[in-house]
Image (cartoon, rainbow, N blue to C red):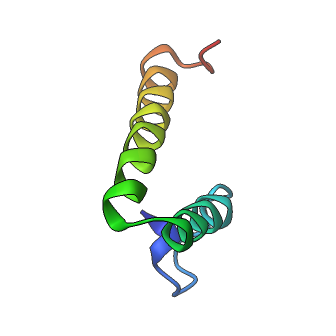
Amino acid sequence: MSADIDDGRYDAPEAPGLDSVLRGLSLTGTDDQTLAVATPIFDGLYEFHRQRVLSGREPS
């Protein structure tokens, strides 16, 4: 994921937002709590982009 790489090589527009969310979660709970919240978020992002690639359009 490009949010955790600070070398300027990756410039996905969502990276700064994801980075902020994950850093904020890590400041408010344990690693296990952060994973419990972040895992479904990343699963949803993956599925959204998977369906977009397969269908050639944004899922509704």
Q: 54 above or below 34?
A: above
Q: Residue at x 43, y 43 (%)?
A: 42
Q: How many marks?
A: 0
- Residue 7: x and y in percent read 51, 87
34 lies left or right of 7: left
Write down the quadrant of residue 60 in the picture. Answer: top right
Q: Nearer the viewer, residue 27 or 3?
A: 27
Task: Give residue 3's position: percent from left, percent from top.
Answer: 52, 69
The residue lying at 58 percent from left, 67 percent from top is 19
**Residue at the farthest front position:** 29
Q: Position of residue 57 (x, y in %)?
A: 61, 18
Please tell me whether residue 50 is drawn above or below residue 21 in the rendered image. Answer: above
Residue in view at x 42 percent, y 62 percent: 1
Nearer to the camera, 55 or 23: 23
Vertical placement of residue 37 versus 40, above or below: below
Q: Residue furthest left?
A: 32
Residue 38 coordinates in the image, percent (x, y): 44, 49
- The residue lying furthest to the bottom in this view is 7
